Image (cartoon, grey):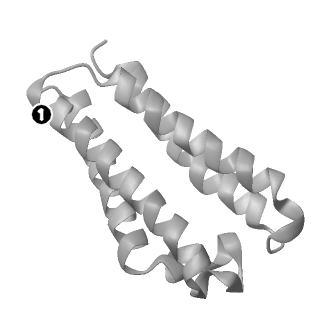
Amino acid sequence: MPASRIAAVAVLALRIAYGAGLLVAPARLARRWLGDGVDGPAAQVPLRALGVREILLHTGAGIAALQGAPLRPWLAASIAGDVSDIAWTAAARSELPDGAVGATAVVAGGSALVSAAVAVVVDA
């Protein structure tokens, strides 16, 4: 397997782990992002849904990587999800803790940049 695919699988595994973390401990992972409201079911339902998105999307990409199938469409979907997280966080900034937009931009933006970098080198 080419080094670019190995790197892609490593990145995808981290995203799957993040998704699993959101399923198991959504409040712990999202408190800085969403504030104290993460303890209730109204916040934990969408956080767990986000976890499922991360797991399914990145598992599908991982399977594609291991099978030698195209990865760029999967990575584009991942980037779109990250950008969406940033955009909706920014739109709700007045209702979120101080620093939530910046932290989301760093975390989700960093994830999008890593996925973009992988997309550039994979299958090139």
Q: Is residue 117 visible?
A: no
> Most extreme residue toward the right, as rendered?
94
Q: Quadrant of residue 17?
A: bottom left
The quadrant of the picture occupied by the N terminus is top left
Q: Secondary structure at mark 1?
A: helix
Can you say whether 30 is above or below 88 in the image? below
Residue lying at 75% horizontally and 66% vertically, measured from the top left: 100
Q: Quadrant of residue 72?
A: top left
Q: Residue furthest top?
A: 124
Give me the residue at 36% from left, 78% from top: 24
The answer, for residue 73, to whether it is visible in the render is yes
Q: Quadrant of residue 40?
A: bottom right
Estimate how packed mark 1 is, as few (under 14), some (14 to 19) or many (20 or more) residues with alpha carbons within 10 Å: some
Position of residue 46 in the picture relative to residue 123 (left or right): right
Q: Residue visible at 29% across and 25% down?
A: 71
* Tag count: 1
Q: Amino acid at mark 1?
A: Leu
Foreground: 48 or 101?
48
Q: Tell me residue 80's x, y (percent).
A: 55, 34
Q: Is residue 73 above or below residue 95?
A: above
Answer left or right for 5 relative to 89: left
Q: From the image, tell me which residue sits under label 1.
A: 66
Q: Residue at x 26, y 28 (%)?
A: 4
Q: Could you tell me residue 102's position as x and y percent?
A: 76, 58
Quadrant of the image containing the C terminus: top left
The correct choice, above or below, for 73 with respect to 91 in the image is above
Q: Position of residue 117 (x, y in %)?
A: 45, 30
